[in-house]
Amino acid sequence: MQSLRFVMLGVALVLAAGVPAQAGEQAVKPPFQLSDVRMMVRLSQPQIAPDGKRIALIVTRYDWKTDQSRPRIEVVDVASGKARVLTWHRKGINALQWSHDGTRLGFIAEAPAPAAVKAEGGKSGAAVTGADAKPKPQVFVLPMDGGDARQITQTPRGVDVFAWSPHDARIAYISEDAPANAKALAHHDGAFEVTDGNFQLRNALAPWHLWVVASSGSKAVRLTEGSYSLQTDQQGTPYPAWSADGRTIAFIRYPGPYWGPSFHSIVDVVAAAGGTPRTLSDQQGAMSVQYAPDSATRYAYLRPRNGDENNGNAVYVGANGHDRDVTADLARNIDSYAWMPDGRSLLLSGELGTRSVLWLQPLHGKARVLDLGDVDVQQQPSVARDGAIAFIGSTSTHPDELYVLRRAGAAPRRLTDLNSIADQRLLGRTQSIDWTGPGGFHEDGVLVYPVHYEAGRRYPLVLVIHGGPEGASTVVFSPLTQLLSAAGFLVFEPNYRGSTNLGDAYQHAIFRDTGEGPGQDVMAGLAAVEKLGIVDTNRIGVSGWSYGGYMTAWLTGHYDIWKAAVAGAALTDWVMDYTIAYYQMGDTYFFGGSPWVAKYRDIWRAQSPIAYAQNVKAPTLIMGDVGDANVPLVNSYEWYHALRDNGVAVRFIAYPADTHFPEDIVQTTDVYRRWVDWMKQYLH
């Protein structure tokens, strides 16, 4: 399963773009400011109704004073664009899904723990303590003709995802089992065996399994059990998939609840009435299974192309045990897919150069890119029965909004204006830039000009390097990049081998070449920007979060041109990271084997920036989250002490969060502020 490591999360660092400013605009509009970040609205999970007339989505605003997010479900009328709020004051909203007849909307939200609910109803309930006393995510169903949402599930461990049956009578959901050592835990005996878990774990994990409940609410029926799991401790849970006749449910089967061995996932299926599951596809690395419309046998799933974890994700379609990569001709990474109503084609999303696009892919034949104008696709689109498509989109001058296509090939129409703050600000001009890199690779990136750019002048330049490495820099709006532009910087966002936007050969080229090759790619891109004659070559800074932080550490240890650096959530020591991070087996696919095996030992150390820390001269700001299980903060501790002990000007800022990037608005804006101020301090 192709998994994006070191990708920045939350409202954070989607990479930015802008447009030229007219003379009148420069006199009237102020540049994008840090305070504007607080006003930005997050749109997510668009779900178009089966008849294509309404779109439900989650709209999240941020409360600066309380540092809380305020999500709510809204439904937008496609014809008029008018929005109606469906929920208020609910927490943990997730997994929106229309019933097939369009009369009800299902979603997940927090609810009091089941035992606590019993006690409130006047019946005896067991004492609720510790983690089990906290609110749990449960399934709710909201009638669209009026009335309150009804809680359908009462699962002790909560619900991760769910799916309606074809005729809406039942709901399949996935929930975590109770701990195997529950009795011992009750007596404060929490010792557990360490296997594939990361160093942040405080207890052994229980597997996740499949249940079915009536959509009107009833006692749930368990369908799977065992040591295997339908979810792991990291990333999102794959949705269960009903066959069109409602008789079977397909699901992704992991070896266990830990992410480490998750690359061996396969597709299983179980009868909705109960029974022993069987394997539907044994192709390892499978994820995101969906049955074709009106089919009980044809299915699709994502999987790294040819099972090679260093390739991009492909879409495989199968029936009766025969699976085929229908996206082989594209030979590039696919972020997501959805069946079209005819069952003979698929809607694909992914990066193409410096754009995020949609393809229409027939089951037999070549895919074609849909013309979306200047709109780039963010998140997975949703498809109605009439072929209408809803998606969240962004342009170079405007953050995320809700868009609709009446059919594949139609022009996109914007339905919301929730992020109009950007229209009131002066933004930096953007252009894509490409060059020929080492090994003859065609490479590209995004260049954002200072807000008040004047031809003939040379400006300080800041590199903002994307994470992943399986990610890409594209021309979409980003707070960080526009803040740097407003501060008077050129901003260069290079793609490099391992990126997902230039095809499998380019993505695969990072295999056993995680630092030197990508570093040379970035430097070739920098040379291309310098040829434009607009860069003050004595004032260049480098920065990035996640794998962008790794690249920052690598570049400052190998090239003596940087006057400042920001290393966010940076991996600096591959061996240590493999040993304690949740990623573990994911790291081995970069190198071919374990660092603790003599055959592979040397390359892991040679590709670690910490081995070259003594070469670093650039003043460096280090940032990261204390509870980051993806890139443990120990990496940053090593980097900080190595730089400080060698006389480098360095500061280390840690955020008390258990995420890979702070998800709350206060700490997010603090990251931006420190990032920009560090560059201003050393480059202005």
Image (spheres, rainbow, N blue to C red):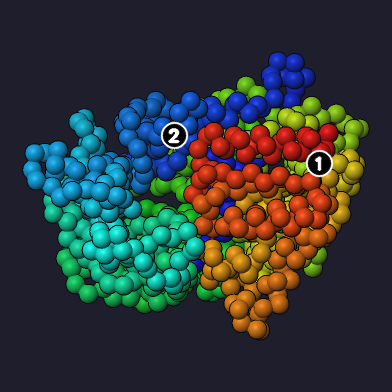
For the C terminus, which image quadrant?
top right
Observer-side mark, 1 or 2, equals 2
Counting labels gives: 2
Disc 1, SS: strand
Which disc is residue 242 wearing? none
Horizontal arrangement in the rendering, residue 612 relative to residue 595 (left or right): right
Which disc is residue 69 wearing? 2
User: Can I make out residue 169 in this image?
Assistant: no
Label 1: few (<14), some or many (≥20) within 10 Å?
many
User: Can I make out residue 622 in this image?
Assistant: yes
The kind of residue on which mark 2 rests is Ser
The kind of residue on which mark 1 rests is Leu
Which residue has dot 1 on it? 461
1 or 2: tag closer to the N-terminus: 2
Disc 2, SS: strand
Q: Nearer the viewer, residue 416 or 85?
A: 85
Corner quadrant of residue 419: top right
Horizontal arrangement in the rendering, residue 395 relative to residue 658 (left or right): right
Residue at (54% x, 63% y) in the render: 581
